[in-house]
Image (cartoon, rainbow, N blue to C red):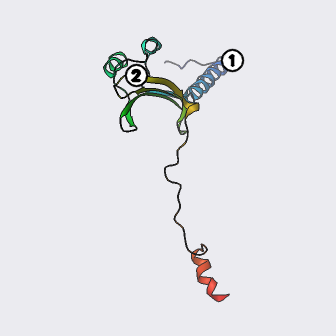
């Protein structure tokens, strides 16, 4: 006949304490933010080699293809290398904590005219459409319009 080993009270308390500590550690680990990196920003050594007067081909050989390009003043092109870092904790909305944009502007001959690195603090919120359609008269709800006849 086999019997189950009996656990004495101090051992049971330690076991419950360890289980509680393990559970608390798991809860804390679940609340750690998830950090995501998007895009590409060249390494510092590559940026040190970038100089005014380089051709587009030299820039692409050094830094790779840009994240995006833009044509400014219909003749001069710009290359943009964009990188961003976001943090998300559990189920909350992700928050962008860092953004770096390397902007390279070319002259009419396709040579580097200027370049700069911009951060999140340099960004501006652009409201795409803030116009509102004008409404004739004052705005009334359904009930107000129904009962306005009886005044």
Secondary element at image label 2: strand
Mark 2 crowdedness (10 Å alpha carbons): few <14, some 14-19, many ≥20? many
From the viewer's perspective, is 122 left or right of 66?
Answer: right
The residue positioned farthest toward the front in the image shown? 108
Which residue sits at x=52%, y=48%? 127
Q: Work out whether mark 2 precedes mark 1 in sequence or the reverse, and give the earlier one.
A: 1
- Left or right, 44 with reference to 147: left
Question: Is the C-beta separation of discs 2 and 1 under 8 Å?
Answer: no
Residue drawn at point x = 45 percent, y = 11 percent: 45
Residue at left offset 65%, top offset 22%: 17
Foreground: 137 or 85?
137
Residue 89 visible to an observer of this rendering: no
Residue 120: image x %, image y %? 55, 31
**Vertical order, 58 against 85 (above or below):** above
Residue identified by numbered label 2: 112
The one of 103 and 93 positioned closer to us in this rendering: 103
**Secondary structure under badge 1?**
helix
Q: Quadrant of residue 20?
A: top right
The residue lying toward the viewer, choosing from 4 and 8, is 8
In the rendered view, would you say 96 is above or below 46? below
**Residue 56 point in image, percent of width and height:** 33, 22
Q: Give the image location of residue 90, x and y in percent.
A: 54, 34
Q: Residue at x 55, y 42 (%)?
A: 125
Q: Which residue is mark 1?
A: 10
């Amino acid at each position: 006949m086999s019997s189950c080993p009996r656990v004495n009270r101090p051992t049971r308390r330690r076991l419950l304490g360890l289980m509680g500590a393990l559970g608390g550690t798991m809860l804390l680990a679940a609340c750690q933010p998830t950090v995501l990196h998007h895009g590409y920003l060249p390494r510092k050594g590559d940026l040190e080699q970038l100089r005014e007067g380089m051709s587009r081909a030299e820039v692409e050989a050094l830094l790779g293809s840009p994240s995006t390009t833009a044509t400014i003043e219909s003749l001069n092109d710009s290359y943009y290398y964009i990188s961003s870092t976001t943090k998300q904790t559990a189920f909350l909305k992700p928050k962008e904590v860092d953004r770096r944009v390397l902007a390279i502007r070319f002259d009419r001959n396709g040579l580097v005219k200027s370049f700069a690195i911009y951060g999140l603090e340099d960004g501006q919120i652009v409201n795409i459409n803030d116009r509102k359609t004008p409404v004739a008269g004052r705005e009334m709800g359904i009930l107000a319009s129904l009962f306005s006849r009886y005044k």
